[in-house]
Amino acid sequence: MPRRLFTPIQANQSLPLVRRIVADILGKARELRALGGSHGSDRVADLQHQIADLVRELEQLGCQYKDWGFEIGLVDFPSKIDGRRVLLCWRSDEDSVAQYHGEHEGFAGRRPIPSHLLPDESSAEPAGDHVG
């Protein structure tokens, strides 16, 4: 099954839902950390299951959850820029998806998405679905 590719516009349009899911993941992870040494408790198992379900929900949307320390809510959106596969990169403290990195470069390799690929703020209409 081919992996979904997002345009920067599509990634930004998905942010309201992605933001809610990531907030839920981070909230449940905070609760899990607060339980500390309660390993084996039903609540710990329940929270772990809920977090896994939320991560799967992101994956079903086509996103990749990357913050396994559960601190910043890092999400990648598979894409193509200039014919090259990349990952559009968003953190939960950012207003929009505006950075990307190569598939194997990771967070440290982030750079700005070319402005001509970002939504035109004067227009509510997307520029199209072409991923180039």
Image: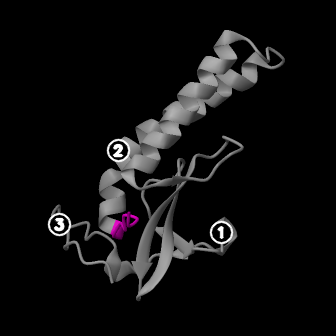
Tell us which disc is closer to us: 3 or 2.
Answer: 2
Q: Where does residue 96 sit, x and y in percent of width and height?
A: 42, 58
First of labels 2, 1 by sequence position? 2
Residue situated in front as seen by the camera: 20 or 80: 80
**Residue carrying label 3:** 123
Magenta span: chief secondary structure: loop
Q: Which residues are magenta?
A: 1-8
Q: Please report the residue visible at 35 percent of the width from the left and 44 percent of the height from the top.
A: 16
In the image, residue 94 above or below residue 98? above
Which amino acid, by three-letter code, is at mark 2? Pro
Which amino acid, by three-letter code, is at mark 1? Gly
Q: Residues within 10 Å of mark 1 (few under 14, many from 20)?
A: some
First of labels 3, 2 by sequence position? 2
Mark 3 residue element: loop
Which amino acid, by three-letter code, is at mark 3? Ser
Residue 42: image quadrant is top right
Residue situated in front as seen by the camera: 4 or 86: 4
Number of callouts? 3
Q: Where does residue 47 sit, x and y in percent of width and height?
A: 61, 22
**Residue carrying label 2:** 16
Residue situated in front as seen by the camera: 59 or 22: 59
Q: Where does residue 38 sit, x and y in percent of width and height?
A: 79, 14
Q: Please report contact status of discs 1 and 3: CB closer than 8 Å, yes or no.
A: no
First of labels 1, 3 by sequence position? 1
**Residue carrying label 1:** 106
Q: Please report the residue visible at 44 percent of the width from the left and 53 percent of the height from the top.
A: 95
In the image, residue 21 above or below residue 129? above
